[in-house]
Image (spheres, grey):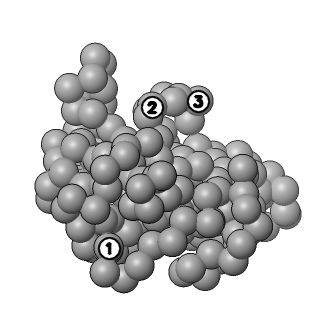
Amino acid sequence: SSSGAAPHDGGTAGLFTDADITDAEVAQTVTLTADPFTVAAGAEVFMCQVFANPFGANADLISMHGTMSVGSHHFFLFNMDPNATGLSLVYAANIGKLAPCPGGGLEFHPFPFLSQQPDWTVNYPTASDGSPMGYPLVAANSLMVNIHYLNTTSAAISPSVSITIKTAKPGVVKTHV
């Protein structure tokens, strides 16, 4: 649920916006942006783009801020394990490329972020000891955006989707979600 508090990094209040994340706890901030694409008038698309782990190591994700332009229905940020049965060949071949989703868009994998809002922030809550909770991303795993757009207009649209991710410094997160 949402506390209704204003987020720390801009955007609409989202899940767990009551978490207090200080600059001293943040190790890295990275923005992933999907490649440009077009949705024809009256069309529906599910587009996916796989990103190699942008942190290059194990990381605890503590805050995410996603944005989607007009026409969006939702987007997921999936945590993709290259060793999961049936996934390694399909997703490894697509690292860095925007393409129609291999599963037709109707697929689910572990995910730290989901939004149906054009501007949404997720800060994981604070543990009982006062430390931020975080979502663990294993160094070998990649991240995939799964983007769903419905163009109800009579003209093509060129959507934009991005997500800014903050990670905690080593040892800050003691409770994983």
Residue 25: assigned label: 1
Local secondary structure at mark 1: helix
Q: Which residue is mark 2?
A: 109
Q: Residue at x 80, y 52 (%)?
A: 42
Left or right of 86, for residue 73 = right
Left or right of 7, for residue 129 = left
Amino acid at dot 3: Leu
Hey, which quadrant is residue 80 in on the image? Answer: top left
Q: Residue at x 56, y 60 (%)?
A: 122
Nearest to the observer: residue 29 or residue 68: 29
Left or right of 41, for residue 38 = left
Earlier sequence position, callout 3 versus callout 1: 1
Q: Residue at x 51, y 71 (%)?
A: 20
Nearest to the observer: residue 86 or residue 28: 28
Residues under numbered marks 1 and 2 in contact, where contact means CB atoms less than 8 Å apart: no
Image quadrant holding the C terminus, namely: top left
Q: Residue at x 53, y 56 (%)?
A: 125
Residue 106: assigned label: 3
Residues under numbered marks 3 and 1 in contact, where contact means CB atoms less than 8 Å apart: no
What x and y, as percent, mark residue 41?
77, 58
Nearest to the observer: residue 8 or residue 151: 8
Local secondary structure at mark 2: loop
Residue 3 visible, this angle? yes
